[in-house]
Amino acid sequence: MAANFPFRDETDTSFSSELKLIPRWSVAAAVLAFVVMQYLFWVVFPKARSHPGPPIGLRLYFALSWSALAALYMLMVGYVSNDSPRRGMSARIWILVCLVMPGGIGAVLYFLLRQPIVFLCPVCSTRVQSEYHFCPQCAYQVSASCGNCYRSVRVTDLFCFHCGHDLALDNRPARLHAFRS
């Protein structure tokens, strides 16, 4: 039977937990960007024209789409500000890249080049990448893995879903036997 180890939660990258990374200042900036863009499209731009404007449907489409893009841009900058430190990357540099690169190219670069999530080993405080099963410094088991094929498994699994190995037969380090249920 699988033991209940104090492993990190494998569901910590779900969409709802990713949304929690967006800070409140970013949500406020997104609302402000939406309102400013609406003001520009309905007040400032019509006054600057000397000829009749486009039909109301087209104006509405452009006002809503550009406002939504500006708001999403602010939300993305807020997400990057909280996501980059947990991946061991510089938040200041990536926020600057996202703000300076035009048309969302900075955000695309961030998502293409971002590193895996990094956390600290509970024993020796070494920075360990999320795909590691053992700490590279002290060999502490930081995530559940099959003793036969060494692939990731959930702590609630009884058998490895890759090779069918009985996970209860695995020889765990002596320090982990205390966490068995």
Image (spheres, rainbow, N blue to C red):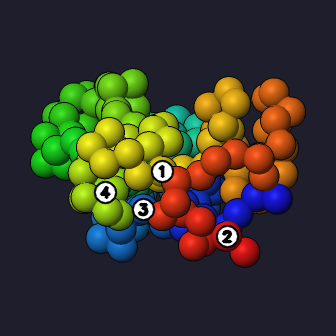
Instruction: Work out whether mark 3 precedes mark 4 in sequence or the reverse, and give the earlier one.
Output: 3
Q: Considering the numbered disc 4 on the image, is that residue within a helix, a strand or a loop?
A: strand
Q: Which residue is mark 2?
A: 180
**What residue is at 24 percent from the left and 59 percent from the top?**
125
Mark 3 to mark 4 CA distance (whole Å): 19 Å
Q: Nearer the viewer, mark 1 or mark 4?
A: 1
Mark 3 to mark 1 CA distance (whole Å): 27 Å
Give whichever of 128, 181 is nearer the camera: 181
Give whichever of 106, 82 is nearer the camera: 82
Q: Nearer the viewer, mark 4 or mark 2?
A: 2
Quadrant of the rendering where the C terminus is positioned: bottom right
Q: Which residue is mark 4?
A: 120
Q: Considering the numbered disc 2 on the image, is that residue within a helix, a strand or a loop?
A: loop
Mark 2: give few (<14), some (14-19) or many (20+) Cα within 10 Å.
few
Instruction: Work out whether mark 2 precedes mark 1 in sequence or the reverse, and give the earlier one.
Output: 1
Q: Considering the numbered disc 3 on the image, is that residue within a helix, a strand or a loop?
A: loop
Instruction: Work out whether mark 3 precedes mark 1 in sequence or the reverse, and give the earlier one.
Output: 3
Q: Position of residue 116 (x, y in %)?
A: 40, 37
Residue 141's disc number: 1
Mark 4: give few (<14), some (14-19) or many (20+) Cα within 10 Å.
some
Q: Position of residue 147 (x, y in %)?
A: 66, 37
Q: What type is the residue that disc 1 sits on?
A: Gln
Mark 2 to mark 1 CA distance (whole Å): 14 Å
